[in-house]
Amino acid sequence: MTNHWVDIRNANVILSMGGNSAEAHPVGFRWVMHAKERNNAILISVDPRYNRTTAVADVHAWLRTGTDIVWLGGLINYLIETGRFHHEYVRAYTDASHLVEEGFGFDDGLFVGYDPETRTYDKTNWNYQKDEQGFVVTDPTLEHPRCVFQLMRQHYSRYTVDMVEQVCGMPRKKVLQIWDLIAQTSAPDKTMTILYALGWTQHTIGSQIIRTGAMVQLLLGNMGMPGGGVNALRGHSNIQGLTDIGLLSNLLTGYMGLPAAELQRYEDYMKVRTKQPLLPGEVSYWKHYDRFFISLMKDWYGDLATAENDWLYDWLPKLSQPLYDVLYAINQAAKGEMTGTICQGFNILASFPHKDKVLEGLSKLKYFVIMDPLEVETGEFWKNYGEYNPVDPATIGTEVFRLPTTCFAEDDGSITNSSRWLQWHVKAAPGPGESQTDMAILAGLMMRLKKLYQDEGGAFPDPILNLTWNYTNPWHPESEALAKEANGRALRDITDETGKVIKRAGELLDDFSQLRADGSTACGCWIYTGSFTEAGNMMARRDNADPYGVGTTLGWAWAWPANRRLMYNRASARPDGTPWASNKAYIWWNGERWIGADVPDYPIFTPPSAGVGPFIVTQTGTGHFFASEQLNDGPFPEHYEPMESPIDRNPLHPDNPLAFHNPIVRVFPSDRDHFGTNDEFPYAATTYRLTEHFHFWTTHALLNAIVQPEKFIEIGEVLAAELGIAQGERVRVTSKRGLIEAVAVVTKRMVPLQVDGRTVHQIGIPLHYGFKGVARPAHLTNSLTPFVGDGNTQTPEFKSFLVNVEKL
Amino acid sequence: MSVRVSRRSFLKLGAAGLGASSMAMMGFAPEQALASIRHFKLTGSTMTRNICTYCSVGCGMLLYTRGDGAINVIDQVYHVEGDPDHPVSRGSLCPRGAGVLDFINSETRVKYPEVREPFTNEWKRISWDEALDRIARHMKDDRDRNFETHDDKGQLVNRWLTTSMVAASACTNETAYLTQKIARALGMLVVDNQARV
């Protein structure tokens, strides 16, 4: 979330799209209700299903799954053509005025630079024009045909109301009614918040859907504002933290990236990663990349990492492809090219798409390790559970280890919620039996590996033998020790620019401005600097005071970055430093410094007259409509159909088969035959979560199993009548990849949509239930889903695929 | 941060403290005044503060544990309620969070390290030492056999691609950081978490 849970109450309009927070985040949703009570806020629900968020919404519309870019792109077109956007904000705070290189273009569904052989783009021309000094050329009038504003206007001119109606299946009257409500928040004293979740993410165009939402918010001037923002309601208690820590194939901590193999020299890596300002005087915070990176290497390798050896840059693993994601991993396993897999509290058999393929992959491993508090399905992939897992153990040669771990109630540490708050928790009781914490298990493995490499030697042992391990008990590192390590400390005395010592050697750092690029600081995760200082554990703070009455509790826990609760909050004030509106006052310039309800997202003593932009992490200081080379599938989001579509063409580009689906989508050769067509599988399906369940965990919890005991699907009354299915009857749902059986809930909540000249029925399938635990056993929903991911993140397309339904 | 609470005992002490002193002055023995009421269920419990382990709202939870932490006593969580001080949840829990006790105390918790040998149909209980020794051996053998110092273009890559790892979605940041440190020191690249699924 750019903003935070309590801040939702400051909104005037709430767009719930790509999420269903009333059911998926019920307690967070109280702040939506609070906004309705407090501000007469309008709640808009746009979703393939009428869900419980819809039930309390002021306005609601059904949308065909996977067509969000068309709807949002249409909204951009509407806001620009009606002039109902925040003109001053767009001029002053966005890249609308920046000119784009002449070579950039878009034609018949493809951006410039597409190579159909490799299915990738050459992004060379996807950039701003620069002058002799290397600064971006701008046209403040926004009239120049190559300025971002005009290019964006042209790009979305194709996204007409008629097109939205045709592709999304939403009546034009409804579309215009909702857009009118949203456009009202272009006024400085009104804000809209966008709440989304995996309903936007899990598509082959997921990253671009989210970008389109961000562009709408920039146009309306809602970024950096209380009650505004683009708010990802994350699904698990700490995937925000795991992502911050960089547990993704291509990341280091704090959103630093692992190097590509081409960057053989440290200087080359630094050149790519260090972002210098592209407009004079801008902050461009990533210009300090070396401070963050060197401090990380100092934490890992201590005195061995020096300027002379490039801080041991050579010791880092290098990438030969953008990602080594989970789909890649399973595909490698299914090809027999993976030896082992270690699963730390992750039920992958149930959570990855195309269960049969996952099963095949796991069955070809030499060894498999699962660390989990529960006896989840994945640990028993080799065991026969009848129709739910029809395997023959005698044919599966994988050696499987199941290690009992403690759960949240049984260890200490911090987790990071959607609001980026790091909240500390305390062990309440020991785990059952011989269970151990994940940290003790990892330390046990690492201590053994260190010893094995010490005794036997082996492949490149240096990083293993020299990894810092200064824990009081090396077999049981303490949470507090790791938290301090992530926060960072001074290795030598640190001075400010006047030569005054600001930190003594050994002291914990207060904030990331104290990090140094000369090896005098060590820091595990620069964005977490300030979470555990000499003043104590900031994440355990419990002062819930809200002195400004805007829902900002700076003394409760700690938020990254720098305890800031609302990102880009400089944009909540006008260029002259006064609030856009008195009812939206958040931070402001008092003549000497920036003050207000939050930690300013801006240099505190830089006056408004300096003209420094509010988005201090970008190279231009502006919010970007134009994504340059940052995304793989284009600088402006474009709609492409899901890999399995209920229609036969992309209505935006009916004659270009290359632009039917996302042109850069990655399909492994062995999966080509595992996509269905709409003549065989006519219904568009989408998966989702229920209020009473959490993934596959709560099927092990008796209370939850009692209140929601059995797998079901939702099917509309019209389709159910066509298929002769009555309420409560059992049905079989099939896709090209597998089947599930479930109870049919026949409902008014799903309706047929008119799309591109045909009737499209949608089916809702909860993702829960498996063959372990105390709920009724069931087929895993991911028996059905396609093995394909988003063009940027490879997030599987769980939200749009094709099925057939038959009565049992 | 553990707080010993015993609301009823506290109330009793408070009231009895006043009463006992004045009654003692009048010559009454305080024991006779004790009523035989049922004890409040959380009497003698230990309360610890936690954050819900399910979705990402991060609701505050108070966990009440039976047992006093003494040796030979096995503490057990037996009551969970919302933390009224928490600025987001203000004491509320949803149907998932409210049922979390049944997750903590689920009968299907894993209790011992186990191995399923190749081609067999059963779990075999093993010791932690055996489990970690065998896993470390598998990891080292695979790493030594398949570690790539250079790619096919001769570029230095120092990576291990044949063992993959997926990290948990509910573990602590401290666990995550230890995982990151270890994974990259081993040269692992096939590492992911549950952010996307």
Image (tube, rainbow, N blue to C red):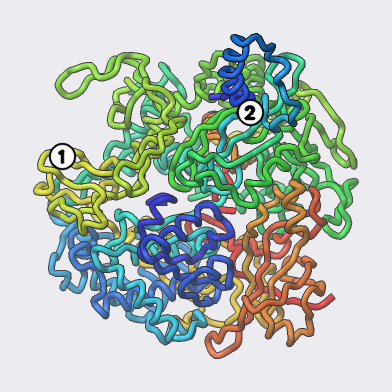
Kind of residue indicated by mark 1: Arg
Judging from the image, mark 1 belongs to the subunit labelled A
Q: Nearer the viewer, residue A688 or A799?
A: A688
Q: Looking at the picture, does residue A131 appear above or below residue A468?
A: below
- Percent across and percent down for residue A269 are 36, 39
Give the left or right position of residue A685, taking residue A741 as reference.
left
Residue at image point 31% right, 73% down: A183
Q: Nearer the viewer, residue B149 or A413?
A: A413
Q: Residue furthest bottom?
A: A757
Q: Quadrant of the C terminus of chain A?
A: bottom right
Which quadrant would residue A89 be assigned to in this image?
Answer: bottom left
Kind of residue indicated by mark 2: Arg
How many residues crowd mark 1 within 10 Å: few (<14), some (14–19), many (20+)?
A: some
Residue at image point 67% right, 55% down: A692
Task: Please tell me the numbered disc located at residue B8.
Answer: 2
Which quadrant would residue A136 be assigned to in this image?
Answer: bottom left
- From this viewpoint, is residue A124 visible? no
Q: Nearer the viewer, residue A779 or A143?
A: A779
Task: Please tell me the numbered disc located at residue A714.
Answer: none
Q: Looking at the picture, does residue A88 appear above or below residue A333?
A: below
Disc 1 target residue:
A593
- Percent across and percent down for residue A647 are 58, 82
Q: Secondary structure at mark 2?
A: helix
How many residues crowd mark 2 within 10 Å: few (<14), some (14–19), many (20+)?
A: some
Q: Looking at the picture, does residue A649 appear above or below residue A362?
A: below
Q: Secondary structure at mark 1?
A: loop
